[in-house]
Amino acid sequence: MRACYCCATMSAATSSASYKRGRKIVLVMVGLPARGKSYTARHLARYLSWLGYPTKVFNTGEIRRSQLGARQTHEFFDPANIEGLRYRRDLAQQTLDALISWLHEDGRVGIYDATNGTRTRRTEVRERCAREGFAVQFVELDTEDPAVIDRNVRDTKLNSPDYAGMEEGQAVRDFRRRIEHYRSTYEKVADDEGSFVRIVDRGRKVVLHEIDGYLPGRIVFFLSNLQISNRPILLTRHGESMDNVAGRIGGDSDLSPRGREYARALAAYVDSRDDLRDSVDVWTSTLRRTLQTAAPLNREISQWRYLDEIDAGSCDGMTYEEIRRKLPEEYEARRKDKLRYKYPRGESYQDVIQRLDRVIVELERYRSPVLVIGHQAVLRTLYSYFMDIPLQRCPHVEMPLHTIIELQPHAYACVERQIQLT
Ligand code: F6P
């Protein structure tokens, strides 16, 4: 966790706010515009969904645009504009209603993405959620760092339909006035408002108040590490191994001659890129085939046991055909539910997700480019997180050998390109 604990204020949960196991949660974003609320909300939704907690973001701006059309200039957000205020209250209410209905159906965590900048508004939200039986946790993003604000305005707001077709300078000025309208009534979350986490300056300082329970704790840990960063993440399977040639799963075999050729091609490719040559960090598993693939790169590598291939337990070293003949029930069970199926004395994809949680948090925290040399199941799992692939599809994602998948994180999604080397 990047948070400096000496700055963190941690208070024990009061019994009234105590989070009961399994209780549905409403995460209420709080912050002035351009503090990264939507970015954070979407990342959090992707992370929690990937961990298996159905999560969805409800954004007031989207509802506003769908009902009133885009192009509301700053006057609409002026607290002195009575009609604007009425509309905004109504939209905020509709957004919360939609979130609550969804949580009553199949949701586990609803993220309410709006400014929620006044104590009165937050009290209404908290009381309403309590009546519905949901736990509430405020997530306040607090920064006055001009670089962060400027970047948020340029990366996200100027691309928003609100400013489509408007000259950039004019759009920036209008947006800054919108921020000032919100600032005129803004109140930070106070200690008597219940459970909250305040992230100051993108994690330089983190204040925790009444954070109680496993899932709320995990949310806070993720938030404390999340950085806005647009460096590439490159995923590749190791070069072809002798077990790949024989069609055997698991094991710890060496690379085949073709696999060694790929390792050399990978090193030449990294050297050919100015943005990677001196700055890329290389992460491998602890298995020989990934270490041999990394060797020609001729640099320090980080070996992670978490990146080892799915543990096939008593099927390790077998071919799929052998499993089908000798253990037909296992074969059939895996075919029916590849996500949840657990090899005897081995792992399921769900288990792999749990152990890769550490790797994801580290990747979200990192600011330099990373090349992950891994294995089929492990890379499917990492890829599904970054590309927001529904869990059921994760075990079926194509993950070809001798191909680099380059992911370029942008404000709200990753852009992917595949580079086939041999
Ligand atoms: O076949 C290569 C391999 O990495 C095996 O070691 C591993 O068991 C398998 O891929 C994972 O893929 P799947 O989940 O499709 O069996």
Image (spheres, grey):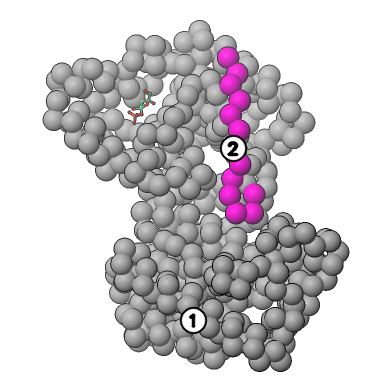
Residue position marked by numbered label 2 in the rendering: 416
- Front of the two marks 2 and 1: 1
- Residue extending furthest right? 169
Where is ligand 1, by quadrant? top left
In the image, is residue 196 above or below residue 381? below
* Kind of residue at badge 2: Glu
Residue type, mark 1 in image:
Gln
Label 2 secondary element: strand
Q: Is residue 119 left or right of residue 35?
A: left
Instruction: State which quadrant residue 159 falls in.
Output: bottom right
Quadrant (top left, top right, bottom left, bottom right) of the C terminus: top right
Residue 398 higher or lower than 165, as above or below: above
Q: In which quarter of the image is the N terminus?
A: bottom right
Q: Give the quadrant of residue 404.
A: top right
The residue that mark 1 highlights is 93
Q: Please count the marks in the image.
A: 2
Please say whether residue 24 is visible from this viewpoint. Answer: no
User: Looking at this view, is 72 or 393 the one in front?
Assistant: 72
Segment colored magenta:
410-422
Q: Which residue is drawn at 41% across and 87% down?
A: 127
Q: Crowdedness of circle 2 by 10 Å Cα count: few (<14), some, many (20+)?
A: some
Q: Which residue is drawn at 27% across and 43% down?
A: 340
